[in-house]
Amino acid sequence: MEKPKFGVAVVMQRRPTQNRWQTEIWEPWGVLTGQPAGAPRLLLDDGTTQQWLHAGFELVLHRDECEGYWLNVSSPEPRVFVRWSMHGDSGVPEMLTLSYDEASRWMDGGAQVDAVAMAPELFAWLGDYVENNYRPEPKKRIRPQSFKHPKDRA
C-alpha cells in the first residue's frame, strides 16, 4: 500500500539582526503547496532580507507516526516542522514532517528544526488521515501509593 504524500516547497528567509556576534539569521519562513519542483530560486531581495523558494519536497505520512500527527492537529497552532542546516552561507531545508514526535527526535539528535504555520489544505489532508487511522488510547490514572491506605499498598 502506498503511503499518502503531499508535494510542498519551503521558503527560507535570511534577515539581518542587531547582534554583534551574528549579523544575519536564516530561518524557515513558510511551507507552500502547489509549487512545481525545481532549483532554489530567489523570491525576494530588498537589500536586507532575502527569501528563497526550495521546491520538490514531499510530506509522507507513516502509520507509526499517527500519535505525533494527532498531537499536531489537536494543538491550538498546527505546524510543519522543517529540519534545515547551513550550506556555506545559506540556510537550506533538508526534511519536513508533520509529526511532533519525529520533530522531537530530530531535535534530540542535535538537528536544527523550526516550525512554521500549517497551510489549511495540509491541515485538512492531515486531519482526514488522523481521523481515519488513529484513536487516542484512554490513559488509566494510577493513584500514587501515598494516596492509598497503608493496608492497600503493594
Image (cartoon, rainbow, N blue to C red):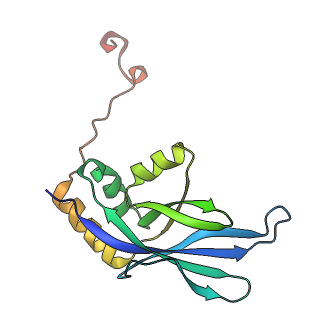
Q: How many marks?
A: 0
Q: Residue furthest right?
A: 20
Which residue lies at the image location 31% right of the left edge and 35% below the top edge? 141
Q: Residue furthest left?
A: 1
Above/below status of 151 relative to 115: above
Q: Is residue 30 left or right of residue 15?
A: left
143 shown above or below 26: above
Vertical side of 87 occupied by 68: above or below: above
The percent position of residue 42, horizontal first and vertical second, equals 57, 83
Quadrant location, the C terminus: top left
Name the foreground residue: 90 vs 120. Answer: 90
**Of the pair 17 and 134, the residue shown nearer to us:** 17
Give percent across and percent down for residue 13.
61, 75
Q: Is residue 98 left or right of 129 when viewed as pictured?
A: right
* Residue shown at the point (27%, 54%) measured from the top left: 62
Most extreme residue toward the front is: 39
User: Where, by quadrant of the figure, is residue 6 drawn?
Assistant: bottom left
Q: Is 82 situated above or below 124?
A: above
Residue sitting at 28 percent across and 52 percent down? 66
Q: Can you say which quadrant of the picture contains the N terminus?
A: bottom left
Front residue of 20/135: it is: 20
Residue at left 39%, top 20%? Answer: 145
Q: Classify residue 42 as left or right of residue 104.
A: right
Residue 139 x, y percent position in the rendering: 28, 40
The answer to which image quadrant residue 77 occupies is bottom left
Viewer-proximal residue among 43 and 15: 43
